[in-house]
């Protein structure tokens, strides 16, 4: 980008930050890699705080409400199956050991209650435990499509933990949840790609700020308290991608949810923080990303809502979202061509160069590593015709036939997929059979993405699977599906959390 064009954009955005100013309507997200100067935009954190303060349920478009309803149901189902994961057992034991059990907020999938911050912590871990939760989709040309945040885990966990002890309504919960998700996603979209590329896990970082936004909305903070909550949350934000494939990845979501609650509760008591934490030269965008694109966030909160455009993807498989186009296409090819595992000599899986940067486990030995292994995901589908919660376990990963099939899967960069750009997850499959045939396929998007969305009924089916995995009765699970389906009519959220208690 030329210096004159950069200055023109900065001037337009500076005008947008001044009351009565107008942003250039043609401004679009620009590649952060081309910037050499940190944007000077005053009042950005205040704009976020005012969005939190002034946005209510009545401001949510009908289609956004319905999209959010699916993610809320999805998140609750994942909290149930996450409650029986090792991380669920350990996190409950941790909270119990603190001597704080017995609060007013439900730890989903269990009989335990705890103070809001600790319920948010355990529930955030639970929702993200199986890496099965929804995913924000990037749109900028220098981003990797599908690699931003898992927005529901931090925002919903914080909102639910605070709404229950206050006996708030379904509408109040939904408003706070949507505000939290929107703030989280727009911040993740704006921050420079360096943030994710060099190791930060945005669910833990941007998710903390989103959780604080949801918490501030539910508690009813005023403008200055909300600014302080955002300032506190930004200092709490953390999470490193080197921990992918370990228990610490879902810890990021749990800590984000907890930290958001703590930030709002401290601000309510009068705790202060910087009021320009996002845009300041020593603030979040600069320190955590080296820069940001103001065009991705200035006057963009709710315009459009991220749920509407570019959308949020609900996962069909409990693995990293970048595996899903390949899994969607592999499942299709297996069905269409009646492929049997013993027929397969070699499989080549080609993507753009950014996808192997996240799918880092090429010879997985644990169920958690398998979630970030393209090789395992392909092997499971070829051997078992499915790759669900029961397949992503260490016992299955280490079966001799699985390890042998993994050795036949070759995952790397394909020049055609690379040329297709990073605004999609182009994946090219070539399955070489022992009889000499090669069966090929290509997918740009996965089932569950906005391009191939799940219906509420399909998400309900996923919820039932998760509930059954956790040992939940089908009758109780169906009652919860019905409750979420009419959540805006629920006068006291405790009627729903009672259905989520073990």
Image (cartoon, rainbow, N blue to C red):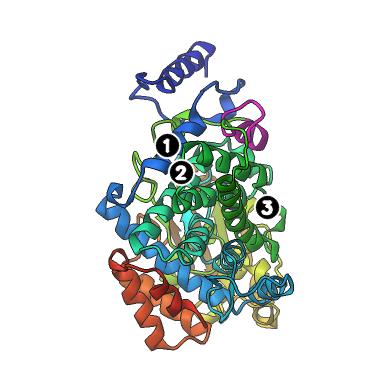
Quarter holding residue 98: bottom right
Q: Which residue is mark 2?
A: 423
**Helix, strand or loop at mark 2:** loop
Q: Nearer the viewer, mark 2 or mark 1?
A: 1
Question: Residue 34: x, y in percent?
Answer: 57, 25
State the separation of the CA atoms marked 1 and 3: 32 Å
Residue 106 position (above or below residue 425):
below
Chain part drawn in magenta = 277-290
Is 55 or 360 nearer to us in this picture? 55
Task: Using residue 394 as the reference point, say whether residue 435 is left or right of it.
Answer: left
Dots 2, 3 in contact, CB < 8 A: no
Task: Please report the residue visible at 55 percent of the width from the left and 49 percent of the height from the top.
Answer: 264
Question: Residue 308: x, y in percent?
Answer: 33, 49
Is 487 or 224 nearer to us in this picture? 224
Question: Residue 307: x, y in percent?
Answer: 37, 51
Residue 243 position (above or below residue 54):
below
- Residue 388 visible at all: no
* Residue 313: in magenta span: no
Report the residue that reaches farthest toward the top: 4
Quarter holding residue 491: bottom left
**Residue 274: image tag:** none
Q: Which residue is mark 1?
A: 50
**Helix, strand or loop at mark 1:** helix
């Amino acid at each position: 980008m030329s210096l004159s064009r950069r200055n023109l954009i900065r001037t337009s955005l500076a005008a947008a930050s001044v009351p009565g100013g107008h942003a250039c309507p043609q401004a679009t997200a620009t590649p952060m890699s081309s910037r050499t100067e940190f944007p000077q935009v005053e009042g950005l954190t205040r704009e976020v705080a005012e969005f939190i303060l002034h946005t209510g349920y009545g401001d949510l478009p009908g289609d956004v409400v319905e999209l959010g309803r699916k993610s809320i149901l999805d998140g609750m189902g994942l909290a149930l199956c996450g409650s029986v994961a090792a991380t669920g057992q350990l996190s409950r034991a941790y909270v119990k050991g603190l001597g704080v059990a017995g609060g007013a907020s439900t730890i989903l999938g269990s009989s335990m209650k705890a103070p809001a911050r600790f319920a948010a912590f355990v529930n955030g871990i639970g929702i993200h435990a199986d890496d099965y939760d929804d995913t924000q989709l990037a749109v900028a040309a220098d981003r990797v499509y599908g690699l931003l945040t898992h927005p529901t885990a931090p925002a919903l966990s914080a909102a639910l933990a605070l709404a229950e002890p206050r006996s708030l309504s379904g509408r109040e919960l939904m408003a706070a949840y949507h505000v939290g998700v929107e703030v989280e996603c727009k911040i993740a979209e704006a921050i420079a790609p360096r943030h994710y590329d060099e190791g930060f896990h945005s669910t833990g970082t941007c998710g903390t700020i989103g959780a604080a936004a949801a918490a501030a909305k539910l508690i009813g903070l005023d403008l200055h308290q909300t600014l302080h909550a955002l300032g506190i949350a930004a200092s709490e934000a953390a999470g490193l991608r080197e921990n992918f494939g370990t228990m610490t990845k879902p810890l990021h979501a749990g800590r984000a949810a907890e930290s958001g609650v703590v930030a709002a509760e401290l601000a309510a008591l009068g705790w202060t923080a910087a009021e320009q934490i996002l845009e300041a030269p020593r603030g979040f965008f600069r320190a955590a990303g080296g820069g940001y694109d103001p065009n991705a966030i200035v006057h963009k909160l709710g315009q459009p809502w991220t749920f509407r455009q570019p959308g949020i993807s609900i996962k069909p498989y409990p693995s990293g979202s970048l595996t899903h186009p390949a899994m969607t296409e592999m499942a299709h090819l297996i069905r269409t061509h009646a492929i049997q595992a013993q027929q397969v000599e070699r499989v080549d899986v080609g993507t753009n160069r950014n996808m192997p940067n996240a799918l880092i486990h090429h010879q997985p030995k644990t169920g958690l590593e398998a979630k970030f292994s393209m090789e395992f995901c392909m092997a499971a589908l070829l051997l078992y015709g499915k790759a669900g919660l029961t397949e992503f376990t260490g016992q299955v990963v280490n079966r001799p036939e699985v390890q042998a099939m993994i050795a036949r899967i070759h995952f790397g960069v394909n020049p055609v997929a690379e040329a297709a750009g990073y605004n999609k997850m182009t994946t090219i499959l070539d399955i070489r059979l022992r009889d000499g045939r090669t069966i090929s396929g290509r997918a740009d998007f996965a089932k569950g993405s906005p391009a191939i969305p799940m219906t509420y009924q399909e998400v309900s089916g996923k919820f039932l699977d998760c509930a059954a995995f956790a040992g939940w009765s089908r009758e109780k699970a169906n009652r919860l599906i019905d409750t979420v389906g009419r959540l805006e009519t629920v006068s006291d959220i405790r009627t729903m959390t009672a259905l989520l208690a073990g």
